[in-house]
Image: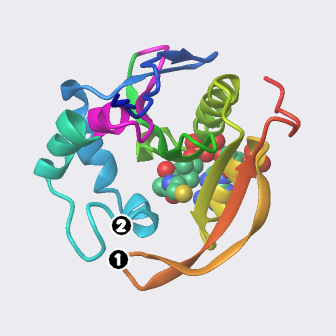
Amino acid sequence: MTTVQSTPIMPAVILETERLRLRSVLERDIDDVYASCTDPELQRWIPLPSPGAPYTRDDAEHFCLRSAPAIRTSGDGQHWAVLARKDHRFIGSMALLRTEWPSMVTEVGYWISPWARGRGYATEALVAVSRWALDQGFQRIELKAASGNAGSRRVAESAGFVHEGIERNAMPLHEGRTDLAVYSLIPSDPRPTD
Ligand SMILES: CC(C)(COP(=O)(O)OP(=O)(O)OC[C@H]1O[C@@H](n2cnc3c(N)ncnc32)[C@H](O)[C@@H]1OP(=O)(O)O)[C@@H](O)C(=O)NCCC(=O)NCCS
């Protein structure tokens, strides 16, 4: 008898917080994704589409129509568009990626659009996604940020992630390579209050 075992996939969920709504990435997000991903601060820390290559509108289209949905359907994780509930404005991206189902480990990644930074949105969205992942039974959520990315490291700490150490020379950026600061959140960690 042959046993066919398919890779688990995450359920597609909409998450809501006091100020934010996290839903699937859609075709209508292309312009905002393009505007966000061509921002120099984002490009400084996340070398999209790949180190040394310029980000084009085709990349934004491919992301919204193909790669973001495929993250969930392939079992790799789930990608959300982050919207402000007050005016439905697109303000960023949150993702669970590189999910290892046998060990129930996943990794979180994020960016906030330049027009929405400095208002606590990254932290609010990260708390919501982390809570959801722990509620799904994940035993470890990893978060990796370039060691010099003070903003992202602060977001990790504000959301209750614990710093574990440094992966040396671990990631290529557009300009050279960087060490990565490694954080994690596990079920027994104190969860931030709302
Ligand atoms: C890093 C980033 C996600 C922060 O988003 P944000 O919504 O502005 O962050 P928040 O408003 O939730 O800020 C949370 C904390 O970080 C601090 N912070 C935010 N940006 C900062 C910066 N550039 N330098 C230092 N601290 C910063 C805030 O003051 C706040 O501190 P507090 O908890 O003491 O109040 C956003 O700037 C971004 O998308 N940057 C480019 C892409 C990127 O680096 N993504 C992460 C890759 S690992």
CB of mark 1 near ligand 1 (< 8 Å): no
Q: Secondary structure at mark 2?
A: loop
Between residue 155 and residue 96, name the one nearer to us. 96
Q: Position of residue 128 (x, y in %)?
A: 64, 27
Q: Is residue 95 visible?
A: yes
Label 2 crowding class (10 Å Cα cut-off): few <14, some 14-19, many 20+? some
Q: Position of residue 165 (x, y in %)?
A: 75, 70
Q: Position of residue 16 (x, y in %)?
A: 56, 15
Distance CA(mark 1)–CA(mark 2): 6 Å
Task: Specify the amino acid type for callout 1.
Answer: His
Task: Specify the amino acid type for callout 2.
Answer: Pro
**Residue that sits furthest to the front in the current view:** 1
Q: Secondary structure at mark 1?
A: loop
Residues at circles 1 and 2 in contact by the CB criterion of under 8 Å = yes
Q: Which residue is mark 2?
A: 47
Mark carried by residue 174: 1
- Residue shown at 70%/30% (left/top)? 134
Residue 144 drawn in magenta = no
- Residue shown at 45%/19% (left/top)? 11
Label 1 crowding class (10 Å Cα cut-off): few <14, some 14-19, many 20+? some
- Residue shown at 59%/62% (left/top)? 145
Q: Is residue 13 above or below residue 108?
A: above
CB of mark 2 near ligand 1 (< 8 Å): no
Q: Magenta span covers which residues?
A: 68-87
**Residue that sits furthest to the left in the current view:** 58
Between residue 168 and residue 117, name the one nearer to us. 168
